[in-house]
Amino acid sequence: MTSAADFLPERRSLDAARRAAAGCQGCPLWQNATQTVFGRGPRAARLMLVGDVPGDREDREGAPFVGPAGRLLDRALAAAGIDRRAVYLTNVVKHFKWEPRGKRRIHRTPSSREVAACLPWLELEIELVRPAGIACLGAVAAKALLGPTVRVTRDRGRLLESPLAPHVTATVHPSALIRIRDPAERDAALARFVADLELLRGVLQRGAA
């Protein structure tokens, strides 16, 4: 099985990486995806948010976090006092993994082999952006970057040691909040998600002072 490592560009820049990723066939997911969804955000972003895999809207538009989960993330970032325009947003896997359900395309969780095959793109993004803080959104991102022993439900709300960045944490993916039916429970979960983001904002502000 090939991997993204076979498609990395010689020139180490985000623009070169984005162009090279557009032709990536490092795992079979490219065959059913509309396009590669590479990360977006400032080259010198101090904060990077990492999700698992693009959704339906992301696949169609070619940008991360532009669907329903992205809109909820916008609300959470604003509530946490974080300017989304200053954040680098990306996913561990760059192609939409889905299964048909009637006329809809339903998100599926990428396998460990698919994550491993695509991981070189994310590693390159981290190398080039060099964020001071990284938030792993959901279990797929947390395990991919921090290892199999990380548990989002147990480890969220605190900083975790990692060579990837000075400040790293794990929290839920905003799509998990959308699936909560009870309004009061959803509001409480959103408030906790905002608090997780505020943790990183606080340490980044202190680091910049």
Image (cartoon, helix red, strand yellow):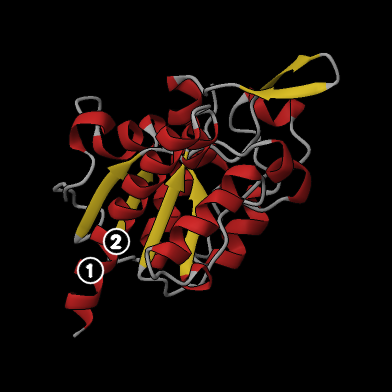
Q: Position of residue 196 (x, y in %)?
A: 29, 51
Q: Position of residue 8 (x, y in %)?
A: 54, 49
The kind of residue tagged 1 is Gly
* Residue found at the far bottom of this picture: 209
* Left or right for 17, reference 185: right
Q: Which residue is mark 1?
A: 202
Verify CB contact (< 8 Å) between mark 1 and mark 2. yes
* Left or right for 6, reference 169: right
Q: Secondary structure at mark 1?
A: helix
Q: Disc 1 to disc 2, how far (Cα)? A: 6 Å
Q: Secondary structure at mark 2?
A: helix
One can see residue 41 in this view: yes
Q: Which residue is mark 2?
A: 198
One can see residue 137 in this view: no
Q: Nearer the viewer, residue 30 or 63?
A: 63
Compared with residue 99, is residue 202 higher up or lower down, i.e. above or below?
below
Q: Nearer the viewer, residue 126 or 186?
A: 186
